[in-house]
Amino acid sequence: MNEQSRIVPNNLEAFWMPFSANRQFKQAPRMFVAAKDMHYTTADGRQVLDGTAGLWCVNAGHCRPKITEAIQSQAAELDYAPAFQMGHPKAFELASRLTTIAPQGLDHVFFTNSGSESVETALKIALAYHRAKGDGARFRLIGRERGYHGVNFGGISVGGIVGNRKMFGTLLTGVDHMRHTHDPERNGYSKGETEHGAELADDLLRIATLHDPSTIAAVIVEPVAGSTGVLPPPKGYLKRLREICDQHGILLIFDEVITGYGRMGTAFASDYFGVTPDIMITAKGLTNGVIPMGAVFVKDTIHDAFMTGPEHLIEFAHGYTYSGNPIAAAAGLATLETYQEEGLFERAKALEPVWADAIHSLKGTRHVIDIRTIGLIGAIELEPMKGEPTKRAFSAFVKAFEEGLLIRTTGDIIALSPPLMVSEEQIGEIVDTLKGILAGLE
């Protein structure tokens, strides 16, 4: 490792950090300077076990050779090619490879640069699709309370996390929200899908009755609500949403930015739950978090509705400068190969019960009021400190870093999502470290 990379910058003020307590961080910086497989290296040379796959994205582990080599080779061969009216082979190759692991019928891919851009793209496709087939009266978009769909205006409009919405005015019009599915009284300490709450899907019928279903273009949900604190769906909930959408001609969009690419022990959560959406949003694990990239999958019927009119005209006026970027495409191909060659999706599936038992062993630990696990995702909900919400979990986050473990917190919830290459011994290390930290918290 380059010695210069160990040096902490002497001026931290220029960088306005995203989703961060900037003042707190800059008083006591937590700097990573290297990473390999399951560990980060800090500026002072300590090893930190990655319990969150970076930010839900490094599913294959850090600095994997095939991915690194693919990026280096591509940068030396073709660094950039425009995606508007031009192309390069790897973008088409990656799209084709992706459709082979996607749920049946999702045979077309639109490339973006992030989960947030994928959400915006999916919402625009949904609205434009209805317009293209002569049903322009469908303009409403339905999200869900506590949903997270990125940080662009469309995403925070259909999203339902108050802290992400309250500073930004009226947002998009024509948006409504279903009730969330969090029900700790009936579903406390759950493993996998929860037993109670399938009837909450019928909240979509209430909204459809209020607005008239013929005005609703699409419903967007995370199969597992991730950033709000890991909320697995109730058994039958997603299938019921699918039924209601089919009944009323509404498109169903799954936001699989977190759940995609093996996190559930399957390629996508759609496979795990046996429900196929009309549009599927992905990013993060697509390139193992190494290069920004997202991919929106759509059904043939949606794609084909745009392929009309004179052939020289643009069918869908949308896209990004970096859509299908050559280096990102190379990283995506190498990531898919790494997943396949190392059997990481299958590994995650085999580890799911081990993971669940380990995380649930923290039941009864001081401050813990609920635990939820599904796939290789876990949430440990803490009792908030009176008058100081989020402080207890944030204190656990800082203490964990000091003790060599990276966790993520959202509100007073600790969220965990390690790389899929995690070992049973490392799962035990995560749990033992957290047990000690929670016991010592105020």
Image (spheres, grey):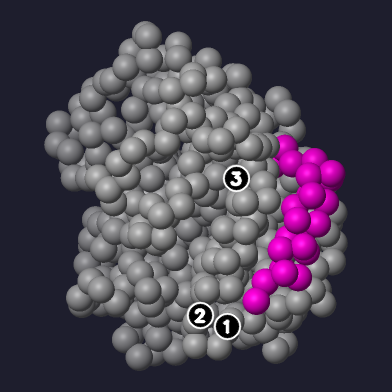
Magenta segment includes 166? no
Residue 12 percent across, percent down from the top left:
32, 45
Vertical relation: 361 (above or below) 305 = below
Query: In the picture provided, is 97 more to the left or to the right than 48?
Result: left
Which amino acid does the dot numbered 3 rest on? Ala
Q: Indicate the amino acid at tag 1.
A: Met
User: In the structure shown, which secondary structural element does the residue marked by tag 1 occupy?
Assistant: loop
Q: Residue at x 60, y 51 (%)?
A: 401
Magenta segment boundaries in residue numbering: 417-442
- Number of the label disc, if any, that sits on residue 389: 2
Q: Where is the N terminus found, in terms of image quarters?
A: top right
Residue at (38% x, 15% y) in the render: 75
The number of numbered badges drawn on the structure is: 3
Query: In what element is the residue under mark 3?
Result: helix
Residue displayed at 46% across by 70% down = 147
Report which quarter residue 307 is drawn in: top left
Q: Quadrant of residue 18?
A: bottom left
Q: Main secondary structure of the magenta part?
A: helix
Secondary structure under badge 2? loop
Q: Position of residue 16 (x, y in %)?
A: 29, 51
Find residue 332 and report its horizontal and vertical position in percent.
49, 30
Q: Residues within 10 Å of mark 1 (few under 14, many from 20)?
A: some
Residue position for label 3: 53
Q: 76 above or below 245? A: above
- Image point 46% across, 45% down: which residue? 283
**Real-space Cα separation, disc 1 to disc 3, in angstroms:** 28 Å
Q: Are marks 1 and 2 in contact (CB under 8 Å)?
A: yes
On residue 385, the disc is 1
Coordinates of residue 96 in the picture (x, y in percent): 49, 30
Give the amino acid at mark 2: Pro
Q: Nearer the viewer, mark 1 or mark 3?
A: 1
Q: Is residue 395 left or right of residue 14?
A: right
